[in-house]
Amino acid sequence: MPLTVAVTGQILIHGPLDLSGEEQREVMNFLKADVTFGNLEATVKTVGAWPTKTKTLHLASTEALASVRQLGFNAVTHANNHAFDLGPPGIASTRIAAEASGLKIAGSGANIDEAAVPVIIPGQDKSLAIFSVDLGPQPDINYASSDRGGIAPLRMRRMVTVPSAEFETLKRIVGSLGDDKRAAARAAVGYDLGERPELEVFGTSVAIGGEIGARWTADEKDRARLITGITAAKAAGHLAAVAIHGHHWDSNWKASPDWLLDLCRGLIDDGADLILGTGAPVMQPVSFHRGRAIIPGLGNFVFHTRRSATYDEKGVDVWRSAAIRLTLVNDGACEKLELLPIAVARPPKDGPPQGPVPLNGGDAADIQARVLANLRPEDRHLVA
């Protein structure tokens, strides 16, 4: 039997949702699948925990997680920039609350082994191993290690290339400021670890190239850890999904950067059967590689932001999205993709916040066109 998988945009939730309406039930019916998961961009409120940032905290109640389960989710991913809002105690509380609500959680943990391990959701014939990783940029303290709680990393780094003349100019600037000598002194006593580039300008690695440009690469250890996990999951007979979250956005949030799509294709080449991306709070088009779905960004599903007025004023399309249901055959290829355009659940004004509801008419047609805009002709038959 094929495996059905339903996915959504990010779940940035603070409190419980009112899911009693007919339209909310329509969304819940669409999400019925062997596996239903999305990115939980929140931390459960934790007594005595100290905020790790001075800007925006997204804290969820345990009742909020119960609503996520009621919507039909059986797993959430948690490697994102708000998972560490209350530090390791928040990570622990969120995992406990998720499990108590009937949700499996991937991407965060008491150490890197727990954060990196996938959750396994069984289907009738196949199971899905769900990995969750964060692309950054984030402070290193947010990432789990052997002796510290946090989230699972797949840190992306940018190498800027410039022609040789500009390279020499930048090198002189760094030398005149003394940055190169300061960096060498720190490295000599082990304060800065790891291989250093020939030239680093204000925290950015620079190399000689034919023109001004940028190359993005994943941290080798992070990638090796993820690929080892995918390989083990496939060897055990599971299909593999990778949830990626990142904030290296292009200026046009509706477009997926080329390097991100290259990363997704590479992960599929290394064994992944499905990629689900979150980060930018707007939708981006889906595509396929070797018959596997790449969903680089579905925007939001629940979005209890405190900046609603700002998004509305600037005309940022954060309130329309889609849920997607995939049918995967036994080798992991996508046999069918179904789409439900939705109106995202907003922060409440009066009373309990409503759950997401379907879009209709021109809004629905616009969202469907946007999601499918980049499909190749040979892949269009996959869309139901």
Image (cartoon, rainbow, N blue to C red):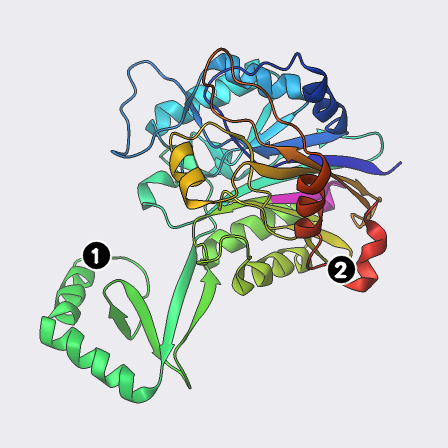
At label 2, counting other C-alpha atoms closer than 10 Å, the crowd grade (few under 14, some 14-19, many 20 or more) is few
At label 1, counting other C-alpha atoms closer than 10 Å, the crowd grade (few under 14, some 14-19, many 20 or more) is few
Residue in the image at 42% along x and 33% along y: 308
Label 2 element class = loop
Residue 10 in view here: yes
> Does residue 59 appear left or right of residue 177 in this picture?
right
Q: Quadrant of the C terminus?
A: top right
2 vs 1, front mark = 2
- Amino acid found under the numbered disc labelled 1: Gly
Q: Nearer the viewer, residue 263 or 347?
A: 347
> Does residue 125 appear left or right of residue 373 in this picture?
right
Q: Which residues are magenta?
A: 233-242
Q: Nearer the viewer, residue 30 or 288?
A: 30
Residue 286 image position (x, y, % from top left) = 67, 52
Of labels 2 and 1, earlier in sequence is 1
Q: Which mark is residue 172?
A: none
Q: Quadrant of the N terminus?
A: top right
Q: Within the magenta stretch, is there residue 238?
A: yes
Q: How many marks?
A: 2
Location of residue 288 with respect to 132 vertically, above or below: below
State the residue position of label 2. 290
Residue in the image at 22% along x and 78% along y: 170
- Amino acid found under the numbered disc labelled 2: Arg
State the residue position of label 1. 190
Residue 46 image position (x, y, % from top left) = 36, 17
Q: Nearer the viewer, residue 100 or 358?
A: 358
Q: Nearer the viewer, residue 145 or 48?
A: 48
